[in-house]
Amino acid sequence: KAQNLAKAATAAERAEREVQLLQVARAASEVEAAKVAAQGAKAWEAVREKVAAHAEKVLAASVAAKRAEVEAELLKVALAMAEGAAAKAAAEGAQVQEAQQAKAAAHNKQMS
């Protein structure tokens, strides 16, 4: 009986040590899992920041392209206005020249 009790006590101690080792291993794996989760969160944050920075660049490029498009349209309008003003000035110049020629012809008629 004493031998059986000693064996049982030894088995109980061994079982208790195994439980303690399992608890330590479990705690260590929980710590490791927490570390992995924290690293994952940091990695995700880094990815999110990169995506946000890229989106910001894309938006800025889109705005710049739209601005260039609007400026091109404004330049077309300005060019059309300048062409219209040039045509008007040419027409007015032709009228002035005709008037001067008519005046000179009239003057020449009076002189002859």
Image: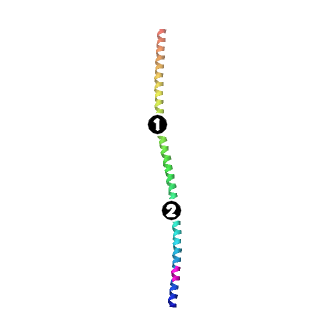
The residue labelled by disc 2 is 40
Judge whether residue 1 is colored magenta.
no
Are there few (<14), some (14-19), or many (20+) residues within 10 Å of tag 2? few
Are there few (<14), some (14-19), or many (20+) residues within 10 Å of tag 1? few
Q: Residue at x 51, y 77 (%)?
A: 19
Of marks 1 and 2, the one in the foreground: 2
Q: Position of residue 32 (x, y in %)?
A: 52, 68
Which span is picked out in magenta? 12-17
Q: Position of residue 20 (x, y in %)?
A: 53, 77
Residue at disc 2, secondary structure: helix
Tag 1 near tag 2, CB within 8 Å: no
Q: Residue at x 46, y 28 (%)?
A: 84
* Vertical relation: 104 (above or below) 11: above
Callout 1, which amino acid? Glu
Nearest to the observer: residue 50 or residue 96: 50
Q: Position of residue 26 (x, y in %)?
A: 51, 72
Number of marks: 2
Callout 2, which amino acid? Gly
Q: Which colouring convention does the figure follow?
A: rainbow
In the image as oriented, which residue stretches furthest toward the front? 1
Nearest to the observer: residue 105 or residue 49: 49
* Vertical relation: 17 (above or below) 98: below
Nearest to the observer: residue 39 or residue 74: 39
The residue labelled by disc 1 is 73
Nearest to the observer: residue 39 or residue 21: 21
* Vertical relation: 86 (above or below) 35: above
Residue at disc 1, secondary structure: helix
Q: Residue at x 49, y 52 (%)?
A: 54
